[in-house]
Image: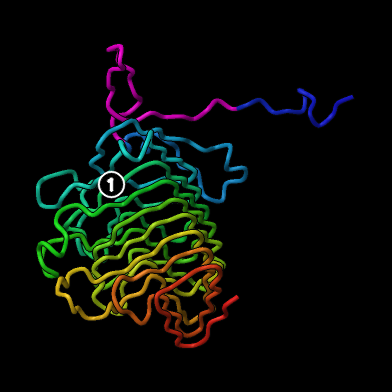
Amino acid sequence: MLTPTSPQLIPPLEAPKLITVGPSPPSMSGIHHPTDFQTISEALHAIPFIPQDTPSQFAYRYTILLLPGHYRERIRMKPFVNLVGISKESVYIEPLPPDEGFPEEHVLRPNTNDAIIMLSGGNNITNISILNPYWATKTNSAIRGVGIRGLGLTNIDVFPSGYWPDKVGKDGPFCRGKILELTEGWTQCIITSLGFTYLGPDDFGVSLVGKGQNADCHFISCFFDALFVDSDVSGCVKIRDCFEVHIRNSILRVHNGQYPDPNPPEVPGSAVDVFGTLGTNVYIEGCSLLCVRPSRRILNIGPNADCFFRHSCTDSIMIWHHCCPN
């Protein structure tokens, strides 16, 4: 008699779809271990396109394993592809600059919607560092997704390259690019151990803009720094027109570091800024919202928005409509 665990009823295990990318460094013994491709984009071009609504999509996943290296390219992910670095301390992704004759597909163009990594449905990205270039503007992003479903980001750092505003002035050449931007009807995202430094003075490092959907979005054990905010629409995280956004066990810090004098103006921006024209809410649990200088709106709760603030602390709070502490 067959049982649910009988070998006859268990489908055969599919061959793993693993692709290795990177240079072919010699091992300690001096023997070279060749990789499948030299660049991430070459590997992605070789992977078939699997539509996001494919049944049993987990059986079709591909994993790209990144060896240590500095990958000078822009990435356009395909559905159900995992991008896994050996370690974030040895895998760096950085786009190429414009106007220097480089291949256009790997150039990050300022004042456009270009992103360093453009997401697709069912992506998981783990153990990488991203260098956000000094020419990136507020319309650029390190990571962007439009209407995606199913995202995992784990153990990722995003650094600004080039000089900081305290060295070149707030009108000088420094990175203004966002860190993470999700728009349209995106949902089902888990972001764990994401760390970033955001230098933009008049926007947010993380922008979550929906269409009134259940975002089912969870930030866990993250560290967000927005160090040079200079307006009341700037800071760490912006949430608009979506609900079920959770931020847990994380530190979010804002600062107006371009003012070195001992009596600087108060910090105008927010660690978390939430409101909407549709129902919007955020759950903040076990978090610290910090500002080292005077501030009024480190937690900013606007109209048509609820904030469930649990086991957390904030240096200031501004409530435009109503808040639901619990």
Name the quadrant of the C terminus.
bottom right
Q: Is residue 73 left or right of residue 282?
A: left
User: Is residue 11 something one can see in this rendering?
Assistant: yes
* Image point (28%, 77%), residue name: 267
Colour treatment of the image: rainbow
The spot of residue 266 in percent (x, y) is 26, 80
Check disc 1 and report the residue beneath it: 74
Tell me where residue 258 appears, x and y as whole percent: 17, 69
Hey, which quadrant is residue 1 in on the image?
Answer: top right
Specify whether 170 is left or right of 85: left
Q: Is residue 223 magenta-colored?
A: no
Q: Residue at x 46, y 29 (%)?
A: 18
Residue type, label 1: Arg
- Provide the major secondary structure of the magenta segment: loop
Assign a secondary structure to mark 1: loop
Residue shown at the point (24%, 63%) measured from the top left: 199
Q: Considering only vertical position in the picture, is 15 above or below 196? A: above
Q: Residues within 10 Å of mark 1 (few under 14, many from 20)?
A: many
Confirm whether the magenta stretch covers residue 17: yes
Q: Quadrant of residue 146?
A: bottom left
Residues 208 and 164: in front is 164
Q: Which contiguous range is marked in magenta?
A: 14-39
Does 162 appear above or below 236? above
Residue 94 is left or right of residue 244, and the answer is left
Residue in the foreground of this view, choosing between 123 and 290: 290
The one of 146 and 86 positioned closer to us in this rendering: 86
Name above or below for residue 225 compared with residue 88. Answer: below
User: Residue sitting at 22 percent across and 81 percent down?
Assistant: 265
